[in-house]
């Protein structure tokens, strides 16, 4: 069959552009019928089950281990501890060094692993393991004046602290000021699918089905830990039931399952119990914010400081980069942004849903609202007056920035004016009615990804890229991108994702996935299309393949290739404010309306329209 674009359609019926068009999810039927298999649902012949034993002390060392009672239980195969577990090499992630020493850095750290013929037997064995500890003094509470606070050298590619101009002098001279403090408590991201892995060794080759947001990274870390080549390991993450950052890096379950499988000589399955997740899969660290803003009577900001205090663990450093948005969001000729950390005896924090930006923007936007009250300036107008012409922290121009237009359009649609700005004056029966506005920023990142595109002799296309679908519809999106480039119906395009045996790709996290994978798929398909057009005669039996295996530095330009493919107007009118910026940050604006009983303290969101500059909507999938 010819691979000319859509050979079966007459010229009068051009193929509709698939990008942004509603489409049936490629794996939708599998999921709703239960045919889709997740990491813990793969059961090789002879598979054993594992159950971990977490430490019960806040800090200390293991002084006693008694596994006799556990090993005596029916069906128990082994109990792994730091005394008999396979030795691991070091990686850049110390949280994966499980069962390697007697040190207990925090409560919940794994100290043993029971393996048995059944899940129930493994759980009973884990409960029968006796562990004795020598406890040590511990510190688990972060305070603004903690004696061990320090400024990290690096935060999200920049310094932990940055000062521009003379903040102290400018703040002291400002006619209007606010000095406010906010606290965001620790938060835990527990996706629907548990952190699970099924591991099997076959003739020295390790195969793992893991619940992960990125099989490429898991493969690389396992290779380092077990001193193998990446070609000796296959990591499969075919379906992932949510991650929210908690599965963004390898977690202990994949290492423990691989260790247990090697130790026992049998496939081993491990799904972490949900009650144990807070201790081993990361969390959003608590953040203590102090925001100071000085402005003139006209509302223009002259001084801005955002200082945060948070914790990390004694195992490895992680910084919740909550002061980063203040470096780029508003006009601020005199600025101070500082992160301070204390290494406490707590589980290591990690990514969770807009790490840094979520708590940072909450504090910054709240302080801006306080300033609006002090100045008696409408909060929408205050944000408009402080929209910078260039990126404040670097002076670089924006590739595009339309926050002002978004705020104005949102205010008009919302019916922002006229309104009574005084608090607690609008009522509906026993309910107080309130309105508010907030903006947000989040990095736009494009990461290195490879892809292959293959045209088969039977007229079909096959796309290979190690993307990960965490429930967001990656298969469908990549199919649409490939079909758009190739000019082919979607049902002729097959997309293979979710295996480290595929061309390597960035993880599904940080809102980088679709842009990075889509760019690679777009380029590979473009190359394939060129080869097909240059080919004469029938395709060879093996078909024709093109690949993108070299990373180009023009990441933002690559993104524009994807987002500029063309889109029907009806799919491009969603009112949400998301703006591409040369400073790698999009900006969004929103205006919620809330209501709540006068004396209850409860608040309910009534409506929350968003304002958005126009950009390509990649997919509007449906089951």
Image (spheres, grey):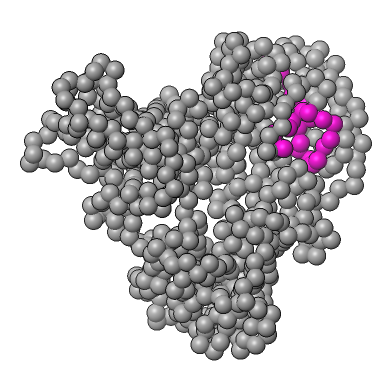
Q: Is residue 201 left or right of residue 309?
A: left
Q: Residue at x 8, y 36 (%)?
A: 10
- Give the number of callouts: 0
Quadrant in the picture for the C terminus: top left
Residue 426 in view in this figure: no
- Is residue 561 positioned above or below 83 on the image? below
Residue 231 in view in this figure: yes
Magenta highlight range: 94-119
**Residue 586, x across and y down, in percent:** 45, 60
Q: Is residue 216 left or right of residue 30?
A: right
**Residue 29, x across and y down, in percent:** 36, 29
**Residue 570, x across and y down, in percent:** 24, 55
Q: Residue at x 66, y 43 (%)?
A: 282
- Is residue 430 positioned above or below 91 on the image? below
- Kindly indicate the quadrant of the structure image that contains residue 368: bottom right
- Is residue 573 positioned above or below 74 on the image? below
- Kindly indicate the quadrant of the structure image that contains residue 261: top right
For the residue pair 529 and 318, the one nearer the viewer reads as 529
**Residue 5, x across and y down, in percent:** 18, 34
Residue 181 on the magenta segment: no
- Is residue 466 positioned above or below 382 on the image? above
């Amino acid at each position: 069959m010819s691979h000319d674009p859509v050979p079966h359609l007459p010229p009068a019926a051009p193929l509709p552009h698939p990008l942004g068009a509603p489409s049936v999810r490629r794996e939708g039927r599998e999921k709703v019928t239960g045919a889709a298999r997740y990491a813990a649902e793969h059961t090789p012949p002879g598979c054993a089950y594992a159950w971990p034993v977490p430490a019960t002390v806040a800090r200390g060392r293991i002084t006693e281990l008694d596994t006799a009672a556990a090993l005596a239980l029916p069906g128990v195969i082994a109990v792994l501890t730091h005394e008999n577990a396979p030795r691991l090499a070091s990686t850049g992630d110390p949280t994966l060094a499980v069962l390697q020493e007697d040190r207990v850095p925090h409560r919940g750290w794994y100290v043993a692993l029971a393996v048995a013929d059944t899940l129930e037997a493994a759980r009973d064995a884990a409960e029968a393991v006796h562990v004795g500890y020598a406890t040590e003094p511990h510190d688990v509470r972060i305070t603004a004046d903690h004696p061990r606070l320090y400024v990290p050298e690096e935060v999200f590619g920049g310094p932990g602290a940055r000062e521009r101009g003379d903040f102290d002098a400018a703040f002291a001279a400002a006619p209007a000021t606010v000095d406010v403090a906010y606290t965001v408590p620790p938060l835990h991201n527990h996706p629907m699918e548990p952190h699970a892995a099924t591991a099997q060794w076959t003739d020295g080759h390790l195969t793992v089905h893991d619940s992960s947001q990125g099989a490429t990274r898991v493969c690389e870390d396992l290779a380092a830990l077990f001193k193998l080549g990446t070609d000796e390991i296959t990591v499969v993450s075919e379906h992932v039931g949510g991650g929210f950052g908690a599965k963004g890096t390898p977690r202990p379950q994949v290492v423990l399952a691989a260790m247990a499988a090697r130790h026992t000589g049998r496939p081993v399955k491990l799904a972490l119990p949900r009650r144990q997740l807070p201790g081993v899969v990361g969390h959003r660290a608590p953040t203590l914010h102090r925001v100071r803003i000085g402005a003139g009577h006209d509302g223009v900001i002259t001084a801005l400081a955002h200082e945060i205090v948070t914790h990390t663990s004694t195992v490895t450093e992680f910084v919740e980069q909550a002061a980063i948005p203040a470096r780029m969001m508003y006009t601020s000729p005199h600025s101070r942004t500082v992160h301070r950390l204390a290494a406490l005896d707590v589980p290591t924090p990690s990514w969770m849903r807009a790490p840094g930006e979520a708590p940072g923007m909450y504090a910054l936007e709240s302080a801006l609202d306080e300033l609006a009250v002090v100045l008696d300036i409408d909060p929408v107008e205050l944000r408009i007056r402080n929209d910078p012409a260039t990126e404040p922290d670097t002076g670089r121009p924006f590739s595009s920035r339309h926050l002002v237009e978004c705020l104005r359009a949102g205010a008009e649609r919302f019916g922002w004016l006229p309104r009574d700005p005084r608090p607690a004056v609008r009522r509906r029966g026993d309910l107080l009615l309130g309105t508010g506005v907030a903006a947000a920023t989040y990095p736009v990142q494009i990461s290195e990804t490879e892809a292959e595109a293959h045209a088969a002799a039977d007229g079909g296309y096959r796309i290979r890229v190690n993307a990960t679908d965490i429930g967001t519809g990656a298969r469908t999106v990549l199919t649409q991108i490939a079909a758009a480039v190739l000019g082919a119906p979607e049902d002729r395009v097959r997309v293979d994702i979710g295996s480290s045996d595929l061309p390597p790709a960035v993880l599904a996290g940080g809102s980088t996935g679709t842009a990075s994978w889509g760019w690679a798929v777009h380029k590979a398909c473009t190359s394939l299309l060129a080869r097909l057009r240059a080919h004469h005669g029938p395709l060879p039996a093996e078909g024709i393949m093109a690949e993108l295996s070299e990373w180009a530095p023009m990441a933002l330009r690559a993104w524009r290739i994807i987002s500029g493919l063309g889109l029907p107007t009806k799919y491009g009118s969603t009112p949400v404010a998301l703006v591409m910026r040369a400073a790698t940050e999009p900006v969004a604006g929103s205006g919620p309306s809330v209501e709540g009983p006068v004396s209850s303290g409860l608040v309910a969101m009534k409506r929350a329209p968003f304002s958005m500059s126009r950009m390509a909507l990649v997919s509007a999938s449906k089951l």
